[in-house]
Image (spheres, coloured by chain):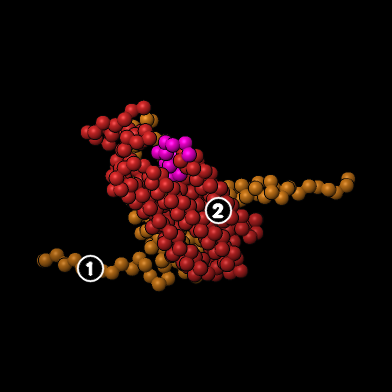
Chain colours: A orange, B red
Amino acid sequence: MAPPKPTLQVSTAITTTDHGQIVVLAGWLCLAIGTSLSMARIYIRWPLNVLAGKDDIAYSVSVLFAFVQTAVIIDAVRRGFGRVEPELEDWQVVRISKVSTISVCILKNALQEVKDCLVGSDLDTTEH
Amino acid sequence: MGSPRLSLIRPCKQVLYATDIIFLFSLWAGKLSVSFLFTRIARESNKMHLGQALTVLVSIFSIVSIFSITLRGDISQPWSYRDADGQSILARWAATGAMSIITDLMITAFSVYLVWSLQMNSKPKSIVITAFALRLFVAPVTIIRLVSLSTVRADDLSFTYTLPETMTQLEMYCNLVAATLPCLRIFLTAWNTSFINIRLEDIDNDAYKKRKWPVSRR
């Protein structure tokens, strides 16, 4: 019996109600470009302890933040980002919430500190 | 089963708020990298001071940009994205985009100033300027991102924010490409002029060893 002929099928990853995979596709392509660039830069500046300077340190910070940003957004797509909201299930809502909790807590505390510095913390002026 | 529509909105906003701030850190660190490169390759004191001034300006732009996006609306819920806040947030992003484009223009202008007075052929000069001028390709991406941000709807943030997020990725990595291009060997060797003590050895030792012509030593 002859094996069935392989047929080409149009991907259904991107639909009219789910554009999350566009972000994933862009994210992975950008990660590949970022990795190649970093390797090229390391190759040019090797040995690093001799040739690397402040510009390379700033570049490393930039690459690190870019990778973290892409990783977070790809993870968010896996948990529901990019879909029309009525399509999302409760478990996706809970999971995306876990992703955001830690980063948002840190940011919120930092913002509160900035606010206290700019405006001044509330003082208890009531007489006892 | 509860209403997923209502319960997703806040976590989605929080993730996008966090990623927007990380994006800004990456963007401005990339631009700082280029300004540090200027101070590294400039050997005349006035050019070096100008490079340091550029670094300070980029640092100020980055701080203003990060605070303008971070401190918005209700301080207890800065990630909130209501339709009423849409124009305000878009204006903040437009200001950030403008600062980014101005920085790119200044970097390109600085590269022209850096090589203009050098006694060398026009070809290596144009190669060096091209390496820095390719950064201007980030500007159209910034503008397209701003246009796509204007289409975001607060009632369906998860779906309508996909295009701006894709453009965010593109802008972030285009900025990284622009920060790396001036360091590539084809552009670095154009600096090997033996003039004002610019030494290829300082910035690309491997290429320096492969070259046959003598290089002036201090």
Is there any visible trace of residue A25 in the rendered image?
yes
The kind of secondary structure element at disc 1 is: loop
Residue depicted at 56% across the width and 48% down the height: B60
The front one of A38 and B103 is: B103
Residue A118 lies left or right of residue A35; in this view the side is right
Q: Is residue B40 magenta?
A: yes
The kind of secondary structure element at disc 2 is: helix
The residue indicated by pointer 2 is: B65
Q: What predominant SS class does the magenta segment belong to?
A: helix
What span is colored magenta in the figure? B33-46
Kind of residue at badge 1: Leu
Q: Picture coordinates of residue B153 (x, y %)?
A: 52, 69
Furthest-bottom residue in this view: A16
Residue depicted at 46% across the width and 66% down the height: B148
Question: Which chain is home to disc 2?
Answer: B
Q: Picture coordinates of residue A41 (x, y %)?
A: 34, 41
Q: Picture coordinates of residue A95 (x, y %)?
A: 49, 56
